[in-house]
Amino acid sequence: MTHASDTTTRGWSLGPVIHPGRIVAWTLLALGAVVMMVPLVYMVATSFKYPNEVYELNIIPHEPTLDNYTYIFQNTRFGIWFVNSLLTSSLVTVSVLFFDSLVGYTLAKFKFRGREFVFIAILTTLMIPTEMLIVPWYIMAKNFGWLNSYWGIMFPGLITGFGVFLMRQFFSGIPDDYIHAARIDGLNEFQIWWKVAMPLVTPALSALAIFTFLGNWTAFLWPLIATNDRALYTVPVGLASFSGEFLSDWELIMTGATLATLPTLIVFIIFQRYIIRGVVLAGLKG
C-alpha cells in the first residue's frame, strides 16, 4: 500500500523530464524563425502602406490600403511578368526532370567505356560560377537569334549538372534485379526507365522539381541580360524596373514581391515533405 502511494506521489511530483539541451535547441530555433519572419512580415505590411508611410518602421500600417495592388495590375505589366515567370519556370522544370533523369539513369544503369569520365565532366560544371557563363550564353543566344525570346530565357537551364548528379545517385540505389526482370518481360529501355525506374525515385523527382522551379522563378541576372522587351520581363526583372537612380517605388516593389512570393509558399507548403525526404535521401546516397 505504501509502495503504491509512493509511486503515485513520485509520478505526480516528477512529471515529464525535459532535457536542457532540447530547451536550448528549441529556443534557438524559435529565435531563428522570428529573425527570418520579420523581413517577410515587413514586406507584406509595406505593401498595404501609402508612399509617405513606407520609411516608417511600424509593422501595422496606420491606414491600410489596397491602392498598391490596384495600381500594380492596372498601370504596370505585372500580370504579364507573372505569366512569363510561370511559363518559363514550368517549362524548364519539365525539361530538367525529363533530360536529367534520362542522363542519370543512363550513367547509373548502363556500363560503357568512359562512363565515369562523363559523370566527372558533368560534375565539374557545378564548379563553374554562373557569372563566368554569362558571356558564352549571350554570344550563343545572339548568334542563334534567341535574344528577346522565351527560348533565350530558358535554354541555359534546360538540363543541369546538379539534376544529373541527384538522379544518378538515386537510380544507382535501384536493384539491378528489377531492371533485368523488366527486360525479361519484354520491355525496352525507355519503357524500363519510364515504368519501372521513375516510380521508384519519386522523392528525388519531387525535390528536383521544387528546387528547379524556385531557382528559375527567382532568377534575375540572365533574364535581365537576355531580354530588353518589357513584355518579356519575368517578375524579378520587372520589379527591378520600379527602382530608379534617384527614386524607388518601394511600396510597389513590396507589393510585387508579396505577390511573387505566393507561388513559392504554395509550392513549399504542398511539397515540403518531398523536399525534406529528397534532401535526406540524397545525403544518404551521396
Image (tube, rainbow, N blue to C red):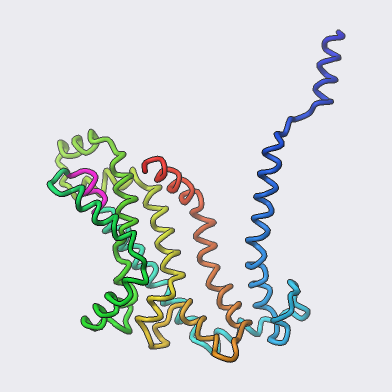
Residue drawn at x 44%, y 76% is 83
Residue drawn at x 44%, y 69% is 217
Position above or below: 14 against 77: above
Considering the image in quadrants, where does the N terminus appear? Answer: top right
Considering the image in quadrants, where does the C terminus appear? Answer: top left
- Residue 248: which quarter of the image? bottom right
Residue 14 pos. (x, y %): 80, 26
The segment highlighted magenta reads: 103-110
- From the viewer's perspective, tell me whether residue 220 is left or right of residue 141: right
* Helix, strand or loop: magenta stretch: helix
Residue 284 pos. (x, y %): 41, 40
What is the residue that sits farthest to the top in this orientation?
1
Residue drawn at x 63%, y 67% is 40
Report if residue 281 lies within the magenta region.
no
Foreground residue, 241 or 28? Answer: 28
Residue 69 pos. (x, y %): 61, 81
- Residue 283: which quarter of the image? top left
Residue 210 pos. (x, y %): 43, 58
Position above or below: 257 against 165: below
Residue drawn at x 41%, y 77% is 84
- From the viewer's perspective, tell me whether residue 73 is left or right of residue 109: right
- From the viewer's perspective, tell me whether residue 79 is left or right of residue 87: right
